[in-house]
Amino acid sequence: MMEKDKIKIKLERHKWPDEIEKEKKKKKKLLVTVLTIIVIFSIGWTTGAIFYKESPSATSGELARFERVYNRLLDNWYFKNDMDDPASEMIENAIKGMIERNGDDHTSYMTLEESQMFTESIDMSFVGIGVQYFADENLITRVFKDSPAEKAGLLPGDIMVGIDDILIDDLDEDQDIKDYILGERGTHVSIIVNRLGEELTFDVVRDSINALTWGEMVDDQTAYLEIASFGSSLRQATELYLREFKANKAKNLIIDFRDNGGGYLDAINELSKLFFKEGTTIYFEKFTDGKEIEYVLEKNGSEIYEFDNIVVLVNENTASASEVFALALRENLGATIVGNTTFGKGTVQTQVQDGVDNSFLKYTFAKWYSPKMENIHKEGIKPDELVKLSDIFYTKYVVLDEGEAINYDQVHDGVSYVQKGLNFLGYHEGRTDGYYDKNTEKALLEFKDKSGLAHDSKIDQETIKSVYSAVIKEWSHNRKDHDVQYHKALEVVSQ
């Protein structure tokens, strides 16, 4: 075959040995933290129809070149038979390839199903009872405001022991109690709990749950508000907690945007009505043609919730809409930002639906700027108080080759991961650079003995997984003890 006839195809189903090797290496680089893993959402999604002037179309010659390649593959490509619908799938792959190679991670092409899943992930809505719990102990840690669980009388600290006529201890390992709690809206579920030694039964009516935000009074002057995503009903969910804070005469507020990847543009505007006065600039948008729009809060009749001091918690996963709001709070209300440098997404996306196949094109159409005209794209927001968590939270989870084990006196990323994990868990105070020394061995053996693992000094995948699991459990159960960013926020907001 002549060189000019060769066509390189990105293929998922059939992989050559070198591709498999690359994929294995990629898996080893998988970043896993014990914090909530999130999707980086795009601000600027609109719900109405999109109207735009047509751009100059590609020439017939350019499209003909694409068509020649497409037809050749459709006629002769060996692997086309692995596809359910080669003609349609190759077009879809071509569109996605065109978008992916343009260097904008926030422009994407989605099927109708993918778009629906994306929307659901932003809104964080589901049908259930409205609790968060530790899966290993079934201990309820949060009851969401105005949820079926709250209305029925469930409380944080309750330990779930049964659901309907099923005892949780009788469930198999592969059975998840979540599957029994979730269900159709309006249906009843009986939740049996142990509350301080007393067994209680609650009849709960399942309903739509808004998990976008959660809050509590930390002390008699300080309130804490965690916002997980800028979904469509964020304002309503947030105001439920702000009313409670006002009733408790809270003077200080901590807003937690950590791991908040953003959401809808409209949600920013709606949430702003609860914090800012009429005439306040929230952000700017700048377009490719040089035009600029200033988003100024108009009179809306909403109650404004004011606080003497506001601290905003952020981390490396704080992105997009949450960055917009964090800067608006800092530049308009003097809020202090605590945590890590944020993700740095300073662009705005919108979507347009194809009227033929119902697919969606989400694309970048503008950049956003703060009230003081700061754009943080690819740089992030620098916090006023830089505070980092334990090193394990920023360390890549290590995947070993099958059967691989690391032994004493070796240097390996897996050793560094275990060292940092054992350091967080209180077993190890020595080096964390990946060299397997005697102090590491001593700490590991102590951890293995207490965890019921084999009493040997090798580090294999089971060891790494066990350390990871122990870190998650410790963080989940004793988060307030380890969350130094939260501690700093409390210190700053009380000054």
Image (cartoon, helix red, strand yellow):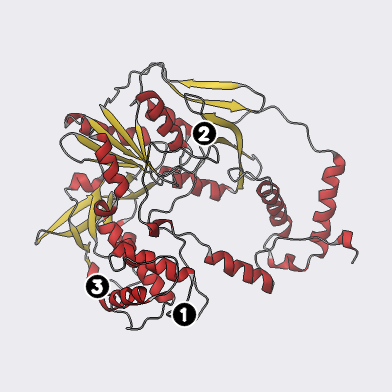
Instruction: Name the residue carrying label 1.
Output: 405
Instruction: Name the residue carrying label 2.
Output: 47
Residue 142 drawn at (x, y percent) = 25, 49
Along the line of sight, which residue is nearer the eye, 216 or 354?
216
Q: Residue at x 30, y 49 (%)?
A: 484
Along the line of sight, which residue is nearer the eye, 205 or 139?
139
Q: Is 98 positioned to the left or the right of 263 in the image?
A: right
State the CA–CA distance, disc 3 to disc 2.
Answer: 46 Å
Frontmost of labels 3 and 1 is: 1
Q: Residue at x 51, y 79 (%)?
A: 402
Label 1 with label 2: CB-CB less than 8 Å: no
Q: Is residue 69 above or below residue 243?
A: below
Q: Residue at x 25, y 51 (%)?
A: 480
State the CA–CA distance, disc 1 to disc 2.
Answer: 52 Å
Instruction: Name the residue carrying label 3.
Output: 170
Disc 2, SS: loop
- Which mark is on residue 198? none
Disc 1, SS: loop
Quadrant (top left, top right, bottom left, bottom right) of the C terminus = top left
Question: How many numbered dots are placed on residues in this image?
Answer: 3
Label 3 with label 1: CB-CB less than 8 Å: no
Query: Could you classify mark 3 by the number of other residues whose Cα lies within 10 Å: few (under 14), some (14-19), or many (20 or more)?
Result: few
Label 3 with label 2: CB-CB less than 8 Å: no
Residue 23 sits in quarter: bottom right
Sequence order check, earlier mark of 1 and 2: 2
